[in-house]
Image: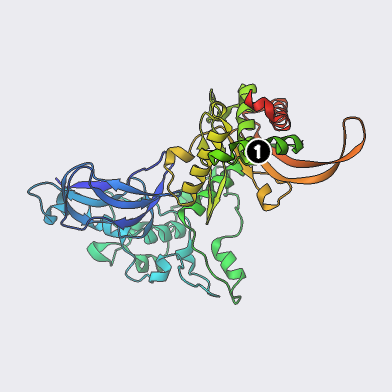
Amino acid sequence: MPTEILMPALSPTMEEGTLAKWLVKEGDTVNAGDLLAEIETDKATMEFEAVDEGTIGKLLVEEGSEGVKVNTPIAVLLEEGESADDIASGGASAPEADAAAEPEKDEKPDEKAGGEGSGKGKAAEPVAQSDTPAPAAPKDEKGERIFASPLARRIAAEKGLDLTQIKGSGPHGRIVRADVEGAKPAAAPAKEAAKPADKAPAPAAPSGPSPDAVMAMYEGREFEEVKLDGMRKTIAARLTEAKQTVPHFYLRREIRLDALMKFRADLNKQLEPRGVKLSVNDFIIKACALALQAVPDANAVWAGDKVLKLKPSDVAVAVAIEGGLFTPVLKDAEMKSLSALSAEMKDLAKRARDRKLAPQEYQGGTFAISNLGMFGIENFDAVINPPHGAILAVGAGLKKPVVGADGELTVATVMSVTLSVDHRVIDGAMGADLLKQIVENLENPMVMLA
């Protein structure tokens, strides 16, 4: 019997991906371990291997297809003695696969791509721009599936149409866009209209202007429509979720860096023959890792109905790349020397910019660091990356007038930091203690070598 090859989950958080490139074609014979395709997740491009042997009978998803849900059939594998004629009766349903992989017969290519192209000054058609997922395929009274394209199902849901009452004009009787656009919903039964008002569902809270409304605002103005890639969609979704669901609070301190700068210069001079050059960020990573050991209850993450306290200090560091960012994790950072942390951070940052990190290298950790000081930013508030318990926003070190220990006015290099804290995991006093430990480590850098 033909076997469906499904879109794999290449990371624990992957929900959909882009089928970037097929490495096989229909009719090819494959063995377990052979490469089938290149799959783009929100973070990286990864190769997908066959787990069974057989012949590729049909490719259900075209190259470049975006938003392919995990566990969606993408190809059909035939066993020995089977042919393509067996697919419709035994394997993937041909009409269903066609509905997922092919555009509507009356849908324009630029609508299917969500307006990809220059898009200058032209608003996209409302239905094509909708982000609402298509409802599940309906069934008739006999329990048999009614074939309808995702676009037709979405329009029907928005108009309140019953697809069992609509005759399809597409291939295999499939209901297409044209079939539902002119249809009108049937009148609701009287008993439904007579339901008490208090049982009516509450309207959903508005979440801002719709994509169509925003497009309409700028009609007649010259603009370029930038298509969202998987990374940008994920960043938008996760950080929106973070600000809506994570109760942030913020703790701010200033750190005097003069002792650290002198200590760093002396160390770098001694390490020069080994080709090692420590950055201020390397010291910040080490300081945070040791602070998490000093305040172990803060070395924790939110896990829905529980808090997980980690033993090691796994510290994530935000790395800016074109179109987004990665947060590679330095594991067991409290155990590593400054030079080891420096070398590992350089390697992770380089591979992050090349999008060559494996999922296990940018997932996990309890704590994150976002350093915008190198860009001249004096101070800012960072958004927590769930499930982390906190993130440290690091500003630039600036020369400022300060009051010395004996009361005299002097000049010092001062760095502003803000600790964003998840109040479900860390309370105010604990967060203050954690930040105090970080400050003390950086202002007394020799302590970090003890």
Residue 49 location, x and y as percent? 27, 45
Residue 201 image offset from top left, x and y in percent: 54, 45
Residue 185 visible in the displayed image? yes
Task: Identify which residue is drawn at 51% across, 41% down.
Answer: 328
Q: In which quarter of the image is residue 216?
A: bottom right
Depth check: give the residue in front, 145 or 57: 57
Q: Which amino acid does label 1 sit on?
A: Leu
Residue at left 70%, top 33%? 442
Q: Is residue 338 left or right of residue 378?
A: left
Residue 148 position, x and y percent, is: 32, 59
* Residue that mark 1 sits on: 392
Horizontal relation, residue 110 to residue 71: left or right: right
Instruction: Give the class, few, some or many, for how many residues have Cα within 10 Å of label 1's Cα (few <14, many ≥20).
Output: many
Q: Considering the numbered disc 1 on the image, is that residue within a helix, a strand or a loop?
A: strand
- Check the image and tell me how it is coloured: rainbow
- Locate the C terminus by quadrant: top right
Q: Position of residue 383 (x, y in %)?
A: 63, 43
Quadrant in which the N terminus is drawn: top left
Residue at 65% from the left image edge and 40% from the top image edge: 280
Q: Which of 56 and 48 is in front in this view?
A: 48
Residue 92 visible at all = no
Q: Considering only vertical position in the picture, is 335 above or below 361?
A: above
Between residues 104 and 19, which one lies in front from this camera angle? 19
Answer above or below: position of 92 versus 269: below
The image quarter in which residue 400 lies:
top right
